Amino acid sequence: MRATVGDQLVQHGRVVGQHDKVGEIVEVMGQEGNPPYRVRFEDGHEGVCSPGPDTEIRHREARQ
């Protein structure tokens, strides 16, 4: 999984009824776009994420 600053990180809900969490990658802490990432979520909090299999990266170029 590779990302750049400005890409979206989407953590899909793990159980029925749980909504996806969407955040913007504000810092790539790994080498060559690899995790971990510092992510700012829609509710304003930031966290460091090492994405798992329930996560996808939506690249900035693909969204425009």
Image (spheres, grey):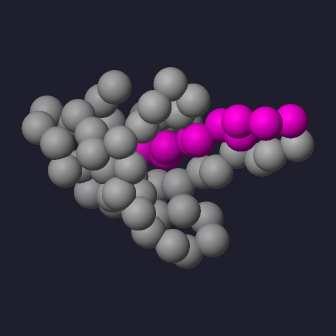
Q: Residue furthest bottom?
A: 44
Residue range of the region highlighted in magenta in the rendering: 5-16
Q: Nearer the viewer, residue 9 or 16?
A: 16
Residue 58 shown left or right of residue 42 in the figure: left
SS majority, magenta? loop
Quadrant location of residue 42?
bottom right
Q: Residue furthest left?
A: 31
Q: Residue furthest front?
A: 15
Residue 49 shown left or right of residue 41 in the figure: left
Q: Tell me residue 14's x, y (percent).
A: 71, 36
Q: Tell me residue 38's x, y (percent).
A: 33, 58
Question: Looking at the image, which residue is at 49% across and 45% down?
Answer: 8
- Residue 8 in view, yes or no: yes
Q: Image quadrant for the N terminus? A: top left
Question: Looking at the image, which residue is at 53% across and 33% down?
Answer: 55
Relative to 34, say whether 46 is above or below.
Answer: below
